[in-house]
Amino acid sequence: MFRAIFQQYEWAAVKQSIYDKTAADVERALSRSHRDLEDFKALISPAAAPYLETMAQISHQLTIKRFGRIMQLYIPLYLSNECQNICTYCGFSYDNKIRRRTLSAGELLTEVGAIRQMGYDHVLLVSGEANQTVGTDYFVKALQVVRPHFAHIAMEVQPLDQEDYELLIGEGLHTVLVYQETYHQEDYKLHHPKGKKSNFGYRLDTPDRLGQAGIYKMGLGVLIGLEDWRTDSFFTALHLQYLEKTYWRTKYSISFPRLRPHAGGLTPKVEMTDRELIQLICAYRLLDEEVELSLSTRESPVFRDHAIRLGITSISAGSRTNPGGYAVDPESLEQFEIHDDRSPALIAEMIRRQGYQPVWKDWQ
């Protein structure tokens, strides 16, 4: 289990080792054809900032070599905003006084129809964490509704037990995204004071349960802004390398969600600049040529237009972060505000202008 490896590291010591990296460490990492976690530390360190152009060129070359000029498009479909957790950064948090709703089978089918009209064949099902109303039984029924209409189905919901994942895989689930939010255990408790999500260890063990269940692909990441992004990213990379070695049949992706405005309005503890996000994207690509890198509509149109050439392999477009947001109930509360509100057609046109081919479903 990854937990045993995680417990061998101390947050403050890892953070210090990253900030102690020098220009010589960065140059050594850039000169190597295969890079390890010490090289990754150098590439995400402040010392790497002057080398961003070189990092971007290598990242672009590695991505083209492995993935070609393909950009995968996906879209989230929010099933419910009901949630039993208190999370300081989320509009769905239990203590926010909002109108709650969970899509019925008929409403879900209406949303599916709207998404299919946009051209999508890859959907990401998302919900708050409310086990009584939006638990495994609900997800089984949702998959049965959605499965005939999409070639690839992903989910971003509460962590489940291994047998639940095995059941959902049997119903057509291909991918699960599970973000640790932050690997800083003490700060994790501050941001998750109530609900099942407050169990740091259970969430940390979720990718192991997914791997043991035989999931096709899993996505990792942290919520950038809760803690020092460099240190959190090191632990994400550590987790990724463990999973790739242990569950080698599974594919992996990394996402880069930066804290966005929401009901409740948590101010980020750490601000990450656009240049720093590009640095992080490139550092992941230089560490791992195989991992998929995903960028959501949290980011601005200008940023996304530039970032897709530097290592990103999938982006969302036309996203709504509220249940029923595409057709059933467009005015229900969003989980967070999106930044890039261009239509999927406009995003696809932008991708083509840059010499890439938009793909509307996951890899086969």
Image: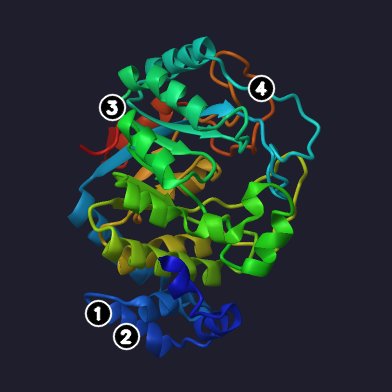
The residue lying toward the viewer, choosing from 235 and 312, is 235
**Residue 32: which disc?**
1
The answer to whether residue 157 is left or right of residue 172 is: right
Question: Contact (CB < 8 A) between labels 4 and 3?
Answer: no
Q: Residue at x 41, y 70 (%)?
A: 238
Cα separation, mark 4 vs mark 1, equals 52 Å
Q: Position of residue 205 (x, y in %)?
A: 47, 58
**Residue 101: which disc?**
4
Circle 3 is placed at which residue position?
Answer: 151
Q: Secondary structure at mark 3?
A: loop
Cα separation, mark 4 vs mark 3, equals 27 Å
Name the residue type under label 2.
Arg
The residue lying toward the viewer, choosing from 126 and 74, is 126
Q: Position of residue 358 (x, y in %)?
A: 29, 34
The answer to whether residue 359 is left or right of residue 162 is: left
Name the residue type under label 4.
Arg
Cα separation, mark 3 vs mark 2, equals 43 Å
Question: Contact (CB < 8 A) between labels 4 and 1?
Answer: no
Question: Contact (CB < 8 A) between labels 1 and 2?
Answer: yes
* Residue 158 in sight from this viewpoint: yes
Please determine whether, in this image, residue 171 is positioned above or below residue 251: above
Give the crowd class for mark 3: few <14, some 14-19, many >=20 residues within 10 Å.
Answer: some
**Residue 28: which disc?**
2
Cα separation, mark 1 vs mark 2, equals 7 Å
Cα separation, mark 3 vs mark 1, equals 38 Å
Q: Position of residue 343 (x, y in %)?
A: 47, 26
User: On the image, which quarter does residue 66 sit in?
Assistant: bottom left
Name the residue type under label 1.
Arg
Name the residue type under label 3.
Ala
Q: Residue at x 41, y 50 (%)?
A: 219
Q: Indicate which disc, 4 or 3, sits on the residue closer to the N terminus.
A: 4
Tell me the mark number nearer the camera, choosing from 4 and 3: 4
